[in-house]
Image: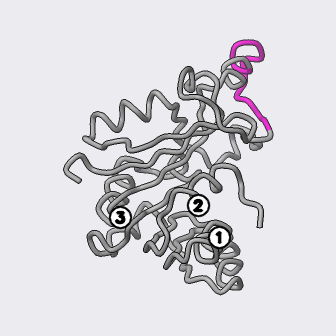
């Protein structure tokens, strides 16, 4: 099975046999990969009932729920990893969702589109309109993205909240690129995080 590039990075960096909660699991593609290739014990939370049905049809343990309100029911440190892929920017309260991820999981993995990428900047500069691209295909009025986060914004956010970055990976056109200049040159970012006291 071929995974989206950010999901492939996540799958490569989850320890074998880990307990994983995939928040915003979509149709379960990452969960299936982690189960089949890493021997992970994976659970999923997804807001879209069609995606939940697709994940369950793959034999996965996924339930319908909203990251903004349904994470508080999970016990502390009940997972090795809590994953939030391409979902942070769609949550109403990203700061609370991140707190919950780091409470539930010993580590959190977060991926998101970088709204400071040069193509986004250029679209705003020359066209004066919110960009519509293959990676951000919705018009401004129809997008699920309600918080337009950049890599530099996210790093500042983590520093303010006492969250440590263990590793970070950056993607442009599906290919990994160096960290230098990532805020301008990377389309997506993936961060492996833990609380400072870990």
In three-dimensional space, the C-alpha distance between marks 2 and 1, rounded to whole angstroms, equals 7 Å
Residue at the disc numbered 3? 105
Between 25 and 35, which is closer to the camera in this rendering?
35
Residue at the disc numbered 1? 33
Q: Taking 155 as reference, is 38 above or below it?
A: below
Horizontal and vertical percent for residue 39? 55, 77
Within 10 angstroms of label 1, few (less than 14), some, or many (20 or more) residues?
Answer: many
**Quadrant (top left, top right, bottom left, bottom right) of the N terminus:** bottom right
Are the residues tagged 2 and 1 within 8 Å (C-beta)? yes
The stretch in magenta equals 123-133
Whichever of callouts 2 and 1 sits on the residue coming sooner in the sequence is 2
Are the residues tagged 2 and 3 within 8 Å (C-beta)? no
Q: Taking 174 as reference, is 110 above or below it?
A: below
Horizontal and vertical percent for residue 160? 27, 34
> In percent of the image, x 46 and y 54: which residue is there?
109
Between 49 and 150, which is closer to the camera in this rendering?
150
Residue at the disc numbered 2? 11
**Could you tell me which secondary element the residue under label 1 belongs to?**
helix
Q: Tell me how many marks there are.
A: 3
- Residue 126 within the segment the image draws in magenta: yes
**Could you tell me which secondary element the residue under label 3 belongs to?**
strand
> In percent of the image, x 75 and y 36: which residue is there?
173
Residue 111 as seen in the image, left or right of residue 108: right
Which numbered mark, 2 or 3, is in the foreground of this view? 2
In three-dimensional space, the C-alpha distance between marks 1 and 3, rounded to whole angstroms, equals 19 Å
Q: Which mark is residue 77?
A: none
């Amino acid at each position: 099975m071929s995974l989206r590039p950010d999901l492939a990075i996540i799958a490569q960096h989850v320890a074998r046999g880990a307990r994983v909660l995939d928040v915003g699991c979509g149709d379960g593609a990452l969960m299936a990969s982690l189960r089949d290739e890493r021997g992970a014990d994976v659970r999923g939370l997804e807001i879209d009932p069609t995606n939940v049905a697709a994940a369950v049809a793959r034999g996965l343990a996924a339930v319908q729920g909203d990251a903004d309100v349904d994470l508080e029911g999970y016990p502390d440190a009940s997972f090795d990893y809590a994953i939030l892929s391409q979902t942070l920017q769609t949550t109403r309260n990203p700061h609370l969702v991140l707190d919950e991820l780091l409470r539930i999981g010993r580590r959190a993995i977060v991926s998101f589109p970088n709204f400071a990428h040069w193509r986004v900047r250029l679209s705003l500069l020359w066209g004066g309109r919110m960009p519509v691209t293959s990676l951000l295909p919705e018009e401004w009025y129809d997008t699920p993205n309600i918080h337009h986060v950049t890599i530099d914004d996210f790093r500042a956010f983590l520093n303010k909240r006492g969250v440590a970055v263990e590793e970070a990976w950056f993607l442009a056109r599906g290919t990994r690129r160096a960290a230098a200049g990532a805020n301008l040159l990377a389309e997506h970012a993936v961060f492996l995080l833990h609380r400072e006291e870990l």
